[in-house]
Image (cartoon, rainbow, N blue to C red):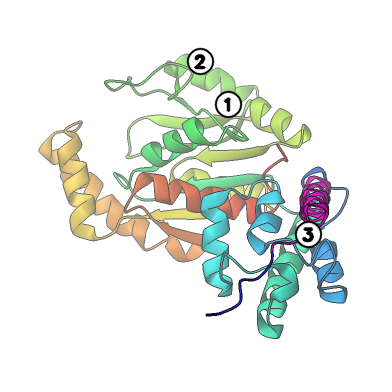
């Protein structure tokens, strides 16, 4: 019969418990330093490499990533998967290649946030019926750090649209006045019918305050913003397929058959313009597409810290 291992003396268990509590508090302090900006995640990783048994070395990689502002659990798991790192890995136990991949990610992220000339303005555009409004609405409801610019338009409200939230609905005389007073960052006639434009003042005030701004506008408007603000980042929203875009346009039942046919012809031309944009996001699911757009804004330093 195997000898039973003796229990450690009570004093040892107490000491071990105190040590464990102290270690947890020390790791919590490191995470708080990263969250507040007192230390960078890259500095913590370097300390972990230099002393694998130290406080930083005992920190799980998942804990380090979620300490970084704007990285939540969902994004953290995606980053870990992209880097090929197990969720249970501590910084001190990372392999050479894992450390290099993590270091490259953190260094790239830090550079983009510190760099100059990074855009606080991101434009979301795409063909008709691709779901720009749905994706923008999801961002408005779920990402409060992003200011979604509200466009002015001369068209009539559609069912469910709210004044000042969906659009500012104005008549032609008011739109003319806004143009004359240089109150619009951009404006255009869309589908040879109504005019749309982006009020300049809310955008300027938000950028000055260090906030991120998303413009959900048409292709002509995106080109106008690119001319006026070359530093803006342009995101083109794509449908999963042409067939799905046709289904969405017909299914929303807001235009007659003649108008639907005309808009589909316009959409073919708009799809051909995607090469002009910095990024392309496929809208198969509004929530997932919204997350990708916000991630792009974060990557380019557009999101203000919470």
In magenta, the rendered stretch is: 7-33
Residue name at image x 56 percent, y 18 percent: 177
**Mark in front: 3 vs 1:** 3
Residue under label 3, please give it: 41
Q: Is 66 drawn above or below residue 140 in the view shown?
A: below
Element under disc 2: helix
Q: Is 115 drawn above or below residue 47 in the view shown?
A: above
Residue under label 2, please give it: 174
Does residue 274 belong to the magenta stretch?
Answer: no
Q: Earlier in the sequence, mark 2 or mark 3?
A: 3
* Residue 242, image x, y percentages: 23, 59
Q: Residue furthest bottom?
A: 96
Residue under label 1, please give it: 179
* Residue 142, image x, y percentages: 50, 35
Q: Are marks 2 and 1 in contact (CB under 8 Å)?
A: no
Q: Is 170 drawn above or below residue 204 in the view shown?
A: above
Q: Is 259 drawn above or below residue 38 in the view shown?
A: above
Location of residue 118 by image quarter: bottom right
Does residue 11 belong to the magenta stretch?
Answer: yes
Say which mark, if any, is on residue 8: none
Location of residue 167 by image quarter: top left
Q: Are marks 2 and 3 in contact (CB under 8 Å)?
A: no
Residue name at image x 78 percent, y 34 percent: 208
Residue name at image x 52 percent, y 61 percent: 78
Q: Earlier in the sequence, mark 3 or mark 1?
A: 3
Q: Residues within 10 Å of mark 3 (few under 14, many from 20)?
A: many
Element under disc 3: helix
Tell me the distance, in whole angstroms, between the alpha carbons under discs 2 and 1.
9 Å
Tell me the quarter of the image containing the C terminus.
Answer: top right
* Residue 195, image x, y percentages: 42, 30
């Amino acid at each position: 019969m195997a000898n039973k291992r003796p229990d450690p003396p009570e004093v040892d268990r107490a000491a071990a418990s105190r040590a464990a509590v102290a270690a947890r508090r020390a790791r919590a302090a490191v995470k708080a330093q990263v969250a507040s900006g007192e230390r960078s995640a890259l500095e913590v990783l370097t300390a972990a490499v230099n002393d694998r048994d130290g406080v930083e070395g005992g920190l799980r990689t998942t804990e380090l990533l979620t300490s970084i502002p704007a990285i939540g659990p969902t994004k953290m798991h995606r980053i870990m998967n992209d880097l090929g790192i197990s969720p249970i890995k501590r910084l001190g136990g990372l392999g050479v290649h894992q450390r290099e991949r993590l270091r490259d990610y953190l260094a790239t992220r830090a550079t983009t946030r510190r760099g100059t000339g990074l855009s606080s303005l991101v434009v979301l555009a795409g063909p008709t019926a691709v779901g720009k409004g749905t994706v923008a609405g999801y961002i408005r409801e779920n990402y409060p750090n992003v200011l979604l610019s509200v466009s002015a338009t001369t068209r009539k409200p559609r069912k469910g649209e709210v004044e000042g939230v969906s659009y500012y609905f104005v008549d032609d005389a008011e739109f003319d006045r806004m143009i004359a007073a240089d109150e619009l960052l951009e404006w255009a006639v869309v589908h040879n019918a109504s005019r749309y434009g982006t009020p300049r003042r809310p955008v300027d005030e938000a950028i000055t305050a260090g906030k991120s701004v998303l413009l959900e506008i048409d292709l002509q408007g995106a080109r106008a913003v690119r001319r006026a603000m070359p530093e803006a980042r342009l995101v083109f929203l794509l449908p999963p397929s042409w067939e799905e875009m046709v289904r969405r346009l017909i299914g929303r039942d807001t235009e007659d058959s003649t108008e639907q046919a005309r808009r589909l012809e316009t959409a073919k031309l708009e799809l051909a313009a995607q090469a002009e944009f910095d990024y392309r996001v496929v809208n198969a699911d509004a929530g997932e597409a919204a997350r990708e757009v916000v991630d792009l804004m974060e990557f380019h330093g557009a999101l203000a810290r919470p």
